[in-house]
Amino acid sequence: MRQFFASFLEVIEIALVAIGAVFLIRSFLIQPFLVSGSSMAPNFENGDYLLIDELTYHFRAPQRGEVIVFRYPNDTSTYFIKRVIGLPGERIEIKNDSITVFSDTDPKGLVLDENYLPKSTVTSGDEIIQLKQGEYLMLGDNRAYSFDSRSWGPLPAKDIIGIVRLRLWPPAGVTAFAAPQY
């Protein structure tokens, strides 16, 4: 009986350690995310199952081109997935189906070459957006059907959850992601 009780306690201990490890990993390191909608098509489709890295942005700021998951600023119970286009302090000009970024490093403007989008993609709008410190401009890859910063404004840094690192589903689409080079 004593041996059974010792074995039972060992099983309970292993289960508690496993539950604790899963809780810590899920709460602070990696979080699953299911894409809902077509705002990021064709790069991310409805039903894609992704892993989100929550740790990286504790050590560095988001970079242009990264795909991130964040809380929608007007309803923080809703999560969105979009691409970082504008960084804090930059001025973004959307005009004639192109995006130009004006910053301290590019005072004359950098026209974004968005080679991750199909050539037929149209970025509608005729606007200039000045980002404050701690604000990001977010756009969906499916520009014609994306509810993004063009509609609701800049994203505050406090609403960012993490960066998309890995697509696990569908099996044929398993992919690791990195930010594009402009």
Image: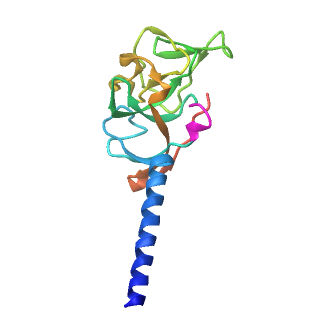
Q: Which residues are drawn in magenta?
A: 56-62
Count of labels shown? 0
Instruction: Give how far across and how far down residue 115 sits, in percent.
Output: 53, 30
Left or right: where does residue 71 sit relative to residue 135? Answer: left
The residue drawn where x is 47% and y is 30% is 83
Query: Residue furthest toward the front?
Result: 2
Asked if the stretch drawn in magenta spans residue 60, the answer is: yes
Quadrant of the rendering where the N terminus is positioned = bottom left
The residue drawn where x is 43% and y is 54% is 23
Q: Nearer the viewer, residue 133 or 65?
A: 133
Using the rendered image of the protein, determine whether residue 74 is visible from the camera's viewpoint: yes
Instruction: Give how far across and how far down residue 10 sits, in percent.
Output: 45, 77
Instruction: Give how far across and how far down residue 150 sits, in percent.
Output: 40, 17
Quadrant of the rendering where the C terminus is positioned = top right
Left or right: where does residue 161 sit relative to residue 90? Answer: left
Relative height, residue 168 to residue 105 (above, below) = below
Q: Quadrant of residue 127?
A: top left
The residue drawn where x is 38% and y is 35% is 41
Relative height, residue 134 to residue 116 (above, below) = above
Relative height, residue 178 to residue 132 (above, below) = below
Asked if the stretch drawn in magenta spans residue 27, the answer is: no
Instruction: Give how far across and how far down residue 48 sits, in percent.
Output: 37, 46
